[in-house]
Image (cartoon, helix red, strand yellow):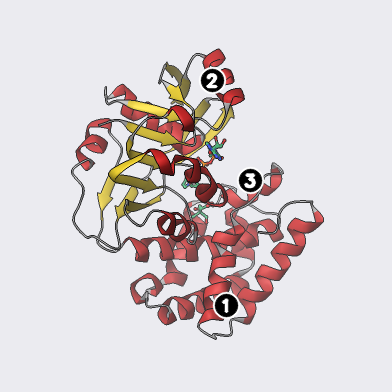
């Protein structure tokens, strides 16, 4: 069955290239005619791995010419996912399955609500890729992708395709716990790296701030029924800060490059959930306010 890939950016291209080289049928869905023309001029997707570039001439289509879609990888940013899926709704085959690769939380529900009859598999990935140029992506960090479906615990049979394509993955009955845990890690680290203008390791100079955020995030996780995600959160945040000390967080890189951040699906989602539970988390709220002010000053969206 064909893998349709919506979002030929960093992660979408990384998946598309690996599936295609395993000789699995893959098709990219590009936004509009201009993108399609640019893609055709480029001659395909290029993946750079360990300094070696290889081009994959994966066929590309527009939403209106995509034909019936049975398996769709949604690889847009969280803030684009719902709008990107919208024009594909008439083309989704009965029983279609979607894989939602978005970081944070909130976008998955927005997409699922539009598709009550399709299966939405959620993903949480620690793989790293970035766009060096249009349709040219660098595989920057090996990682792992957890997949799961909160509504249906049985694993889909297409996991065999990922195995064949060499995409490291695991199926979990508790994907929401994984997504919450990653969201908490991202909330404890990424905004502070932006506000303190530092690499992840620079947060070792702000132990009290990190500690109080971890305590509030753990409280939030307990309140929203995710006790496993709260377990030893502070310890893991300190471990990640140390292990990735030389790196700039993804949010830091977005801000540094003048790109929109996924704030609404990370800190925004955490604060909105706390408010729904009538939970007062003053440090998290203050962090959200400071981060929005910082983005606004730089002319970046605050949602
Ligand atoms: P990206 O910006 O590199 O790629 C997104 C792509 O989606 C872009 O090519 C964009 O043009 C395309 N797109 C947007 N709207 C579209 C539309 N309507 N129709 C068709 N295409 C559309 O983003 P990314 O870095 O690949 O991130 C995707 C998601 O994966 C994010 O939620 C991110 O947080 C998460 N993630 C990324 C990485 C990484 O290393 N890049 C790692 C883990 C998780
Ligand atoms: O996922 C990350 C990111 O930069 O987005 C880490 C490295 C864990 C920092 O939060």
Where disc 2 sits, the SS reads: helix
Question: Are the residues flagged by discs 2 and 3 in contact, CB closer than 8 Å?
Answer: no
Whether ligand 2 has any atom under 8 Å from the Cβ at mark 3 is answered as: yes
Residue under the point 27% across and 22% down: 23
For discs 2 and 1, the disc positioned in front in the rendered view: 2
On-image quarter of the N terminus: top left
Residue under the point 69% across and 41% down: 257
Q: Which residue position is annotated with label 2? A: 39
**Image: 97 above or below 219:** above
Q: 13 or 28, which lies in front?
A: 28
| Circle nearer the N terminus (1, 3) | 1
Looking at the rendered structure, which numbered label has been put on residue 212?
Answer: 1
Residue 296 in the image: x percent, y percent?
A: 78, 58
The crowding category of the residue bearing disc 1, from other C-alpha atoms within 10 Å (few below 14, some 14 to 19, many at least 20), is some
Q: 290 or 105, which lies in front?
A: 105
| Circle nearer the N terminus (2, 1) | 2
CA–CA distance between discs 1 and 3?
24 Å
Q: Which residue position is annotated with label 3? A: 253
Question: Are the residues flagged by discs 1 and 3 in contact, CB closer than 8 Å?
Answer: no
The crowding category of the residue bearing disc 3, from other C-alpha atoms within 10 Å (few below 14, some 14 to 19, many at least 20), is some
Residue 239 in the image: x percent, y percent?
A: 45, 61
- Res 2 quadrant in image: top left
Looking at the rendered structure, which numbered label has been put on residue 94?
Answer: none
Where disc 1 sits, the SS reads: helix
């Amino acid at each position: 069955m064909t893998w349709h890939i919506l979002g030929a950016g960093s992660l979408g291209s990384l998946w598309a290239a690996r599936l295609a080289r395993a000789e699995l049928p893959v098709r990219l869905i590009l936004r509009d005619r201009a993108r399609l023309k640019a893609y055709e001029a480029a001659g395909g997707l290029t993946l750079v791995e360990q300094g070696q570039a290889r081009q994959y001439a994966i066929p590309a289509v527009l939403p209106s010419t995509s034909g019936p879609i049975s398996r769709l990888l949604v690889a847009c940013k969280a803030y684009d996912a719902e709008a990107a899926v919208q024009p594909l709704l008439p083309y989704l085959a009965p029983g279609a399955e979607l894989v939602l690769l978005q970081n944070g939380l909130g976008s998955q529900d927005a997409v699922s609500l539009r598709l009550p009859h399709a299966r939405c598999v959620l993903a949480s990935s620690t793989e790293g890729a970035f766009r060096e140029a249009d349709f040219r992506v660098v595989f920057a960090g090996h990682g792992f992708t957890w997949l799961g479906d909160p509504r249906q615990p049985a694993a889909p049979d297409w996991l065999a395709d990922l195995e064949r394509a060499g995409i490291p993955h695991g199926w979990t009955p508790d994907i929401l716990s994984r997504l919450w845990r990653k969201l908490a890690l991202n909330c404890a680290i990424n905004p502070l790296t932006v506000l303190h203008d530092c690499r992840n390791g620079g947060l070792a100079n702000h132990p009290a701030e990190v500690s109080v955020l971890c305590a509030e995030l753990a409280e939030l996780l307990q309140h929203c029924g995710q006790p496993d995600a709260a377990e030893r959160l502070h310890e893991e945040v300190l471990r990640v800060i140390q292990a990735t000390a030389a790196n700039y967080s993804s949010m830091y890189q977005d801000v540094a490059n003048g790109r929109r951040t996924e704030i609404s699906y990370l800190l925004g989602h955490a604060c909105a959930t706390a408010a729904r539970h009538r939970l007062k988390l003053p440090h998290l709220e203050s962090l959200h306010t400071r981060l929005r002010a910082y983005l606004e000053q730089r002319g970046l969206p605050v949602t």
